[in-house]
Image (spheres, rainbow, N blue to C red):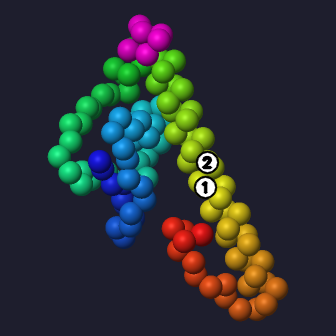
Amino acid sequence: MVDALVREGVEAHVSRTNEYDTGVILVLIDRAARSATVRAVENCEVIMITRSDLMALMKKEQTIAVKLLWSFVQTLTERLRTANTGVVEARKELAIVQATGTEAPFIPASER
């Protein structure tokens, strides 16, 4: 397992990956800057693959390409759903603040 941590000077837990998680590999698709640093929390094996090697593999092995892309879609769907839930919760809290003029009570995500 590995933890993803934000990079902007403050270390904060973002997510924990499971075995064979492909979420970390998404940077290979769109060339965007990394938004987090990954750190192993237990012994693990890591595979490093360059974007050009990944693209060459996907062109050569279409079955692998379909499986990888499907995995990426599933990862993105999960992340979008989580982000959407966060936005909905933030809007609810903002509505409380605007309606009452007081701050909404902080409730950790794990207790919602």
Q: Which residues are magenta?
A: 57-64
Q: How many marks?
A: 2
Q: Which mark is residue 80?
A: 2
Q: Decide if residue 31 is in sight here.
A: no
- Report if residue 29 lies within the magenta region: no
Q: Residue at x 66, y 55 (%)?
A: 84
Q: Assign a secondary structure to mark 2.
A: helix
- Report if residue 58 lies within the magenta region: yes
Q: Is there a contact, CB below 8 Å, between mark 1 and mark 2?
A: yes
Which of the 4 quarters of the picture holds residue 111?
bottom right
Q: Please, what is the three-letter code of the amino acid marked with disc 2? A: Leu
Along the line of sight, the residue nearer the viewer: 106 or 14: 106
Q: Residue at x 67, y 88 (%)?
A: 103
Q: Position of residue 87 (x, y in %)?
A: 67, 62
In this rendering, position of residue 50 left or right of residue 100? left
- Above or below for 76 versus 2: above
Q: Please, what is the three-letter code of the amino acid marked with disc 1? A: Ala
| CA separation in Å, label 1 and label 2 | 5 Å
Q: Residue furthest right?
A: 99
Q: Residue at x 62, y 62 (%)?
A: 86
Q: Position of residue 17 (x, y in %)?
A: 38, 47
Please rate how many residues cluster around mark 2, counting C-alpha atoms within 10 Å: few if below 14, some from 14 to 19, many from 20: few
- Above or below for 35 versus 44: below
Location of mark 1 (residue): 83
Instruction: Kindly report the secondary structure that dominates the magenta region of the rendered protein.
Output: helix
Q: Position of residue 21 (x, y in %)?
A: 39, 38
In this rendering, position of residue 98 left or right of residue 40? right
